[in-house]
Amino acid sequence: MKVLHILYQSLPQISGSSIRSRDILMSQKEIGLNPIAVTSPFQSGTNNEEIIDGIRYLRTSINGSETISDEQKSLLTRIFRFFKILSFYQNLKQIVNAEKPDVLHAHAMFVCGLPAILIGKKYNIPVVYEVRSLWMLKKKGKKGWMDLLTEKILFGIELYVMRKAALVVAINHYLKNELIIQKIDEAKIAVIQNAVNTTLIDTLKQKTRNHCLSEPKLKFGYIGTLTPHEGVDFLIEVFANLNKEICNAELYIFGKGVEEPKIRAMSEKFENVTFKGSLEPENIHKAFELINIIVNPRYKNKLTDSVTPLKPLEAMAYEKIVIGSDVEGIKELITDKFNGLLFEAGNPSDLLNVMKYALKIESETRRHLLKNALQYVYDEKSWLKNATKYQLIYTELLMNKNAN
């Protein structure tokens, strides 16, 4: 079965979205599907076709100057980018004619979804649309009339794509419920939650030394994108208070993003806080080798409630204690004191207490925590498990198509 994945963002650009896409494609290939990726005009490549991790990536933009980021775009830029959908549609149509896929699997945003819907209808190919967040609602603070109008328009286009798709994939149940509220048919929404590439992690873990946390260490860390909603600034401020009581504790920050200048400056300001920058995916084991307790301090808002992060699961697979805020996206992964530790989002005293607790728990309790987390990942959060779910979805769509 050939599945054409239509991606807004992909490797080699590193983000939670591109890593999820990588793992979907790799796991689908591992169970015998034939996944191919085509990327949007906003994801530049060096060649028309690239092979990454054994997967073919077909590019519709070569050596372009645009990059995908969380930085706010001007209205003129947004309009210009919107009209690139027309050229993307033509490129995608040529690729579909050449590759003849059985299924089109478009991944948010609508830049990928709209052309997929039109081409799917033209060639009678089932379209799956994968929704990963309510991304258009992520702007924080006071919003002017232009922001509100833009949100309404973008949300309307996203909902249109969802209604026209044969099936919608949501990454968690909170997001599914939000889509049902927006009158997306519940029967056509499947939930496939975030997971980890256990095959890849097993390989990388062979390169790490002492990956099991047998004794408490005083090394906290954050690994991920540096955006405002992640709360890394909040984590540093809380750690500074912890450091007044436990002077040999350390905090390491790995990542890049729009908050990087701010986080770098804060790291230089406080003792025992080290900014390490970003790592390529094949070197991520080096970060986990350095850190013993991973903290995901996300602030609570509609975006963090609807998005399930990957990094807590990765940390569990690397056998690290995970501390996370109690936003809905993280609560779907962590059961407090079973496979990780939770604190009240945005509450500095609660995070401080949980960090102290993580340092003081007894060895036997720690071993159970790590064992439960590792078992949870392999039993429920492996991409190989998810790949079989996708395969069932595709098979059912093709059966319905043939029946009609």
Image (cartoon, rainbow, N blue to C red):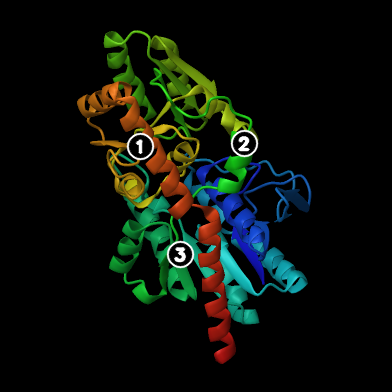
Q: In the rendered image of this protein, does residue 107 appear above or below residue 254?
A: below
Mark 2 → mark 3, Cα distance in angstroms = 29 Å
Of marks 2 and 1, the one in the foreground: 1
Q: Element at badge 1?
A: helix
Disc 1 residue type? His
Q: Which mark is residue 5?
A: none
Where on the picture, by quarter, is residue 183?
Answer: bottom left
Q: Quadrant of residue 88?
A: bottom right
Residue 185 visible, this orientation: no
Residue corresponding to mark 3: 169
Kindly indicate the quadrant of the structure image that contains residue 222.
top left
Q: Residues within 10 Å of mark 3 (few under 14, many from 20)?
A: many
Instruction: Tell me the CA gap for discs 2 and 1.
Output: 23 Å
Inspect this view and state whether residue 68 appears. yes
Position in image of residue 163 (x %, y %): 43, 73
Closer to us: 341 or 214: 214
Few, some or many C-alpha atoms within 10 Å of disc 2 (few <14, some 14-19, many ≥20)? some
Residue beneath the point at 53% across and 85% down: 400
Q: Residue 240 appears at what percent x and percent y? A: 32, 15
Precedes in sequence: disc 2 or disc 3: 3
Task: Please tell me whether mark 3 sits on a helix, a strand or a loop.
Answer: strand
**Residue at which label 2 appears:** 204
Three-letter amino acid code of the residue under disc 3: Val
Q: CA distance from mark 3 to mark 1?
A: 33 Å
- Residue type at numbered disc 2: Leu
Mark 1: few, some, or many residues within 10 Å (few <14, many ≥20)? some
Which disc number belongs to residue 368?
1
Dot placed on the residue nearer the N-terminal end, 2 or 1:
2
